[in-house]
Image (cartoon, rainbow, N blue to C red):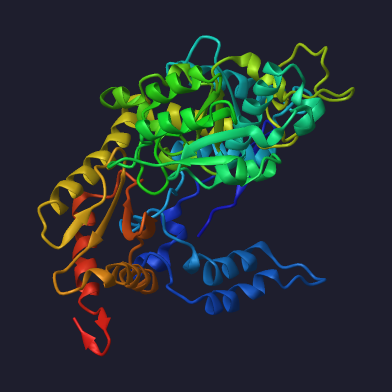
Amino acid sequence: MVAFDSVKKRGVYIFNALWNPTNCFEMNTEQNRLFSGASPEEVQRDLLPLVDFQGAGQSLIKINQLIEENLLPHLMRYDHAGFQSMYNSIPEQGAALGAQIALAHNQGVTNWQVSPGGAMLEELCCKSLCRLFRLSEQADATFMYSGTYANQEALYLAIHKKAELEGFDFGIQGMSGFQDSSRLVILTSRDAHFSINQSARMLGLGEQNLVSLEVGANRQIDLEQLRKTLAELKGTRDVCCIVATAGTTSTGTIDPIEALLEAARHCDAWLHLDGAYGFSFSLLPECQSQFQGMEKVDSITWDPHKQLGIPIPNSVLFVNDKRDFTRISLFSHYFNRETSNEPNPGIKSPPSTRPMSALPLVTSLLHQGMDEVLEKLRIPLQNIRRLSEHLMTQDDFRCWHEPDTGVLCFQYQPSHVPENRRNDLQTFIYETILREGRRSISVTRLGDAIVLRILVISPDIRYDDLVETITDIRSIGAGFTIGDQTL
């Protein structure tokens, strides 16, 4: 049961017991299920009582019981060893403490007036993060609601900078300031997160102003194709931003940052690094060569809620030069005044109200210590690489890439399934696993191929757990039918 009891002491709510996700999912644990496996219709039936709002209120005990019986069985157990599909994690214990304190005080942190401690904590945390990631002395950061919004602000800053090169203020004139806004181009990998497309839409560019770059054998941006694209665009289009990815959504691949930085500088373009998932791994000494040049990129997106187990919302946007945030800053007479000398984090990102997201990250890093954080980052990398090496020795599996991070994409290819039915087989395996509710993997498309995808976020997922998934895949694949024949 979730413990909501608290006592008030010296103006601070002290929770008697930390939230324990293991207790929350006790029923599913007994059945060894990842989630209930119920259909959308069954889940809807169970949840309707939760949204049946009546004139008379209900006791917290009754509501808690309703949640335990009707909602919790249908929540995905991120702490389950079979959860190998998405970028989600239960809160780390230190982070859970910070999240509870933030919730108890309900602090908005965008302005000194509403939370002196909260505003200052975020500012100090951002500076410490810049040092932790070895960014430039001029770097700065802001907390965001999600990586999608961080990417959107980064693209706004990129377009704003391009407008300055053309002699006008994009914040005032918008797209109308460009002589021909259709000339603007954003270059990014075909494997980039769809939030880049979404950002182009929200900013008024449209997807027609996005150019997707082909990827090479290991799903990195193909540098030769990039050079050809830049040559073809020269004189007819204006590249305002190149988006690199550190940990692509489908394969976890890290693009060649330093080479892309050189290309961006050559055409006076902003270089943004979407490191929502993979940027955490730059903290590991053995991975730093993959991030060469990151201290020079213009902006970086990072989601601590992915690999570090920090509660949502918890995303960060870094900029290489803190003055870049002035392009997004807005002031008012009552709030975030231009003459104010106090820290006002709200002038670095759009939301004028957002929670004290820095606190769970701060308490988590304090509780674990960086040595433990680094070790927890290593374990998923080691296990997914062991799995890749294992599958390369199996005649009935084919890996689609060498893992840069904790993601591996592959196909199950038994010899008796014809090549033209392999995509159907992967879809069948994925849907069967999801329906059974005992484990969770994902499926994605790479080129013309539908591939299975395993992602390891939790350091508690062992190599043996991954091998069990492979065994399960083989077993399910045996039930795949071609016509009336079961293979």
Question: Image height check: is 273 above or below 423?
Answer: above
**Whether residue 346 can be seen here:** yes
Camera-side residue: 115 or 207? 207
Q: Quadrant of residue 473?
A: bottom left
**Whether residue 356 can be seen here:** no
User: Could you tell whether 279 is left or right of 124 in the image?
Assistant: left
Q: Quadrant of the C terminus?
A: bottom left
Q: Name the residue: 61% across, 24% down.
A: 122
Camera-side residue: 237 or 126? 237
Question: Image height check: is 357 above or below 341?
Answer: below
Camera-side residue: 156 or 383? 156
Question: Image height check: is 79 above or below 47?
Answer: above
Question: Image height check: is 254 above or below 48?
Answer: above
Camera-side residue: 484 or 314? 484
Residue 150, position in %: x, y? 59, 35
Q: Name the residue: 36% across, 62% down.
A: 440
Q: Quadrant of residue 170?
A: top right
Q: Name the residue: 57% across, 36% down.
A: 151
Total count of labels = 0
Most extreme residue toward the right is 333
Q: Quadrant of residue 358?
A: top right
Residue 299, position in %: x, y? 54, 25
Residue 68, position in %: x, y? 53, 67
Residue 17, position in %: x, y? 50, 46
Q: Name the residue: 44% across, 26% down.
A: 366
User: Could you tell whether 176 is left or right of 221 in the image?
Assistant: right
